[in-house]
């Protein structure tokens, strides 16, 4: 049985509201951000998540706390024998971007790194 989309959207909206009110990610948001890469990538040993929802000085979009759509950064650490093709990487990073933006906002910037270096689509 598929989950009720309206209930799922309500839950996501509540966590977005909490972020707007507190400036902090909920346990639900952090758990998903950490779990999704492990689901998508074989051979992934560790993922570090960094985020920043503070208002950029040049941005005109803000709420009362000075927050914006933000940036989520994933830094991946794979096992030495992990292999991923370019096509697989593109598909998985695209999926992870979609999931991340669903959890936050459509204009949330999603950045990928592999061992601290930029890892692009």
Image (cartoon, rainbow, N blue to C red):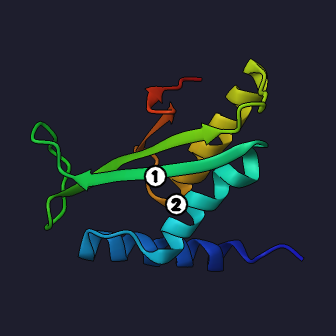
Using residue 53 as the reference point, say whether residue 83 is left or right of it: right
Give the mark nearest the N terminus, 1 or 2.
1
Q: Nearer the viewer, residue 41 or 54?
A: 41
The residue that appears at 74% across and 54% down in the rendered structure is 39
Crowding near the residue tagged with mark 1, few <14, some 14–19, many ≥20 C-alpha atoms within 10 Å = some
In the displayed orientation, state which residue is furthest to the left: 57
Q: Determine whether the residue tagged by mark 1 lies in a helix, strand or loop.
A: strand
Q: CB of mark 1 within 8 Å of CB of mark 2?
A: no
The residue that appears at 15% across and 66% down in the rendered structure is 65
Where does label 1 land, which residue?
Answer: 49
> Residue 19's quadrant in the figure?
bottom left
Where does label 2 land, which residue?
Answer: 103
Using residue 21 as the reference point, say whether residue 80 is left or right of it: right
The residue that appears at 46% across and 47% down in the rendered structure is 106
In the displayed orientation, state which residue is furthest to the right: 1
The residue that appears at 48% across and 50% down in the rendered structure is 48
Using residue 68 as the reference point, say whether residue 80 is left or right of it: right
In the displayed orientation, state which residue is furthest to the front: 80
- The mark closer to the camera, 1 or 2, is 1
Residues at marks 1 and 2, CA–CA distance in whole angstroms: 14 Å
Residue 33 screen position, x and y as percent: 55, 58
Crowding near the residue tagged with mark 2, few <14, some 14–19, many ≥20 C-alpha atoms within 10 Å = many
> Residue 35's quadrant in the figure?
bottom right
Using residue 94 as the reference point, say whether residue 82 is left or right of it: right
Image mark for residue 38: none
């Amino acid at each position: 049985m598929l989950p009720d989309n309206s209930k799922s959207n309500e839950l996501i909206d509540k966590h977005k509201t909490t972020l707007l009110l507190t400036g902090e990610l909920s346990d639900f948001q952090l758990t998903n951000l950490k779990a999704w890469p492990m689901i998508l990538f074989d051979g992934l040993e560790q993922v570090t998540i960094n985020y920043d929802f503070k208002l950029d000085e040049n941005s005109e979009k803000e709420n009362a706390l000075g927050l914006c759509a933000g940036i989520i950064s994933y830094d991946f650490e794979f096992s030495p024998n992990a292999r991923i093709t370019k096509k697989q990487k593109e598909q998985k990073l695209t999926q992870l971007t979609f999931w991340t933006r669903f959890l936050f906002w459509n204009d949330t910037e999603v950045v990928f790194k592999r061992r601290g270096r930029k890892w692009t689509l």
